Amino acid sequence: MDKLPVSFQQVSFSYENSIPVLDDVSFDIHARELVAMVGPNGGGKTTLLKLMTGMLTPSSGSVSLFGKKPLYARPRIGYMPQYLHFDPDFPITVREVVLMGRLGRGGIRGFLGWPDKKDRSKAMECLAHVEMDTLADRPFSDLSGGQKQRVMIARALACEPELLLLDEPTANVDSQTESRFMALLEELSEKITVIMVSHDMGFVSALVKSVLCVNRKVVVHPTSELTGTAIQDIYNCSMQMVRHDHRCTEKGHTHVIPDQRSL
Ligand SMILES: Nc1ncnc2c1ncn2[C@@H]1O[C@H](COP(=O)(O)OP(=O)(O)OP(=O)(O)O)[C@@H](O)[C@H]1O
């Protein structure tokens, strides 16, 4: 039987002597689940993803991916971070950024480390998924924020992951790209496990059956429960259900944002 893609057992984590960001967290994620992670700013979502990638290690408890320590499972993980850390002056093309994703799968196979035909065609296929293939030879630094984000999604897909971790993948992308991305996630989740951080409750509820709610503790909720009181419990503050911003109003999505007065 396949090992669980993600298992957290009594995990606590603190950054350098600060109060715990995550406190006694236990949950399992099964194969081919499509899971959304929600919670207030600072609730610990990115920290949870970093524990899954092995970039951070728990202060106590254990994290296992496919029955192994996260570092050993890395070749099976595609990760799209929340922020981009490329030097804007570094001369790298869009195609090369995506080819870097191939390194995650045990290295580029070509002669002396040059990408081979399969690496190049996979990179182009992933760029096509996010409709960025026509810009493959552009310098990455010339792209807009939303275009860069689409390229980073392609990079996470390029390693042909069995577990895809996405930190706010649609934060800067337009509604058309978001809809296509939604369809892509649905397709992917038939074969692989996908976990994504999202603040967009409309996006989340249309797509996933269960939601990982992160606010120092972690609770798994069926999407159908995510209304009123449940949301208040998750965010531990009063919430507004609002329609907001141009992009989302267009789609008629309802969003949840914390009421700043109570934070
Ligand atoms: N490198 C770090 N050193 C110290 N504290 C950190 C570090 N990274 C994050 N934190 C703190 O840990 C807490 C959780 O941060 P994290 O980024 O995991 O939250 P989040 O739920 O992803 O937030 P957001 O929705 O704003 O992205 C916050 O209080 C944050 O200030």
Image (cartoon, rainbow, N blue to C red):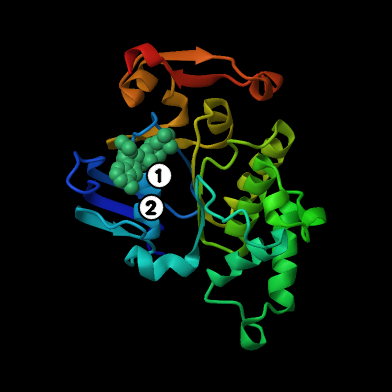
Q: Nearer the viewer, residue 207 or 128?
A: 128
- Along the line of sight, the residue nearer the viewer: 105 or 21: 21
Q: What number is the disc on residue 46?
A: 1
Q: Position of residue 211 (x, y in %)?
A: 43, 35
The residue sitting at the front extreme is 89
Is ligand 1 closer than 8 angstroms to the Cβ of mark 1?
Answer: yes
Query: Residue 232 at what x, y percent from top left?
Result: 35, 18
Q: In the rendered image, which residue does mark 2 sit on?
A: 50
Residue at horizontal 59 percent and vertical 15 percent from the top: 243
Disc 1 to disc 2, C-alpha distance? 6 Å
Disc 1 residue type? Thr
Q: Residue at x 55, y 77 (%)?
A: 107
Front residue of 257 and 206: 257
Image: 1 above or below 168: below
Residue 245's spot in the image, x, y percent? Answer: 62, 19
Ligand 1 lies under 8 Å from the Cβ of mark 2: yes
Q: Are marks 1 and 2 in contact (CB under 8 Å)?
A: yes
Left or right of residue 81, residue 120 in this image: right
Q: Amino acid at mark 2?
A: Lys
Helix, strand or loop at label 1? It is: helix
